[in-house]
Image (cartoon, grey):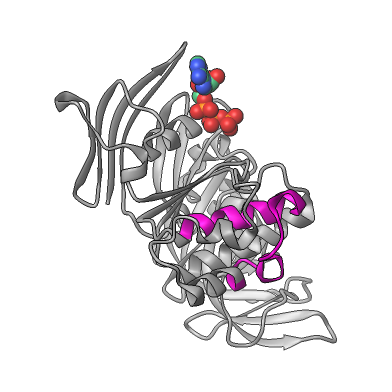
Amino acid sequence: MFELSLSHEQGAFRLDVDLALNGRGVTALFGPSGSGKTTLLRLMAGLDRPDTGRIVLDGQVLVDTRVGLFVPVHRRRLGVVFQEARLFPHYSVRGNLCYGMPARDEPALQRMARLLGIEPLLDRMPGRLSGGEARRVAIGRALLTRPRLLLLDEPLTGLDGDRKQELLGYLAALVRDIEIPVIFVSHDPQELLAVADDLVLMQHGQVRASGPLDTLLARPELMPFLGGFDVSAMLRVVCHRVDPDRHLNELRLADGQRLEVPALNVSPGAVLKIQIRARDVALALTPPEQTSIRNVLGCRVTGLHHTSTPGVTLVALAVGGQVLRALISTASCEALALREGQKVLALVRAVSLARPA
Ligand SMILES: Nc1ncnc2c1ncn2[C@@H]1O[C@H](COP(=O)(O)OP(=O)(O)OP(=O)(O)O)[C@@H](O)[C@H]1O
């Protein structure tokens, strides 16, 4: 558990935060430029002292300004990686990775190098690494110090499309493999969906909302603050079958219902989380005939919610023990006489993102 209750002024900017993070998985600090994400990360890391407040990590008080307590950065046992990798230029990649390791542990080093795809680079000097490679080495170095928590500031910023995708893949694999909680700063929705479990939404130096990503994605009033997002649902599915000829994957929900999506580059048996945008889901009371939509899921209506857009209703649906959401016109809602508890068919047009669960 990571508890923060802070006030901090920086020129004309004021940060006021009251936050309790569960201290598990991956939490993204998300918000527009200048909303205070980096300021908050620096205060968490101990790189800056808050004007007033308290920070407690797993029961240990790191900061309490009332009693003048401030645990310095090197005694917090946190891994911190900033945009610029800050590797030691006169040490090889291996030397950088070893730095800060409690004891030389070659198997741990090899495992980390494999996870981050930097095995072939171990003997290189940092000056001969690309930006993405240097970033991966910096993340590996931070993790090998066995921190209690890993803090990353915009891990993907400054990388081009392919390098970004590549590092995103490594990050997703890494956070599944390590047990260390990660907090990272981002303003890239794609990055967020690919790795975050929880979200802290920052705005003007304050926390606008925080909680599990899936819960926040269901709140239409937050969408303007989540620039680039759509109200969505994240569904856990298993890849059942791959059809290489038709470039399709057949996915199964927990209740056995199937979804067919364009090939996702995963093998049968893989467990995935897929994002389904609410505007890609239509509803019907009877099975549609002669339609291009191949995904039809039996669901039950669990809620009907007004949205900030007049004439648009958000319908919450239960399917296979999970939540799916549909954005439809209020007029359609009335025409179908939708009510809570009713059985409906959800017609799913597209799956916008898939990631390992
Ligand atoms: N050293 C400083 N002195 C005065 N003001 C600062 C200082 N550092 C940052 N600020 C201001 O504090 C505010 C928050 O900055 P911060 O870097 O935390 O935002 P951010 O959400 O991380 O933005 P970005 O996404 O652009 O990195 C900004 O208005 C910024 O101009």
Q: Give the range drawn in magenta.
A: 114-143
In this orientation, which residue lies closer to the viewer: 259 or 161?
A: 161
* Drawn side of residue 73 relative to residue 132, left or right: left
- Would you say residue 142 sits in the magenta stretch? yes
- What is the total number of numbered labels drawn onto the structure image? 0
Q: Which residue is drawn at 65% across and 42% down?
A: 228
Q: Residue at x 34, y 50 (%)?
A: 77
* Drawn side of residue 51 relative to residue 352, left or right: left
Q: Residue at x 78, y 48 (%)?
A: 160
In this orientation, which residue lies closer to the viewer: 319 or 73?
A: 73
In this orientation, which residue lies closer to the viewer: 34 or 79?
A: 79
Q: Quadrant of residue 105?
A: bottom left
Can you give x and y, in whole percent of width and height, for residue 167 in the image? 66, 58
Is residue 307 shown to the viewer in this render? no
Residue furthest to the left in view is 67
* Drawn side of residue 132 relative to residue 239, left or right: right
Can you give x and y, in whole percent of width and height, for residue 114 in the image? 61, 73
- Would you say residue 275 sits in the magenta stretch? no
Can you give x and y, in whole percent of width and height, for residue 235 in the image? 52, 68
* Drawn side of residue 114 relative to residue 56, left or right: right
Q: Is residue 231 above or below residue 270?
A: above
In this orientation, which residue lies closer to the viewer: 91 or 329?
A: 91
Q: In this view, does 326 lie above or below 241?
A: above
Residue furthest to the top in view is 12
Can you give x and y, in whole percent of width and height, for residue 156 in the image? 65, 48
Q: Is residue 97 above or below residue 153?
A: below
* SS assignment for the magenta stretch, majority: helix
Is residue 135 shown to the viewer in this render? yes
Residue furthest to the front in view is 90
Q: Residue at x 31, y 45 (%)?
A: 75
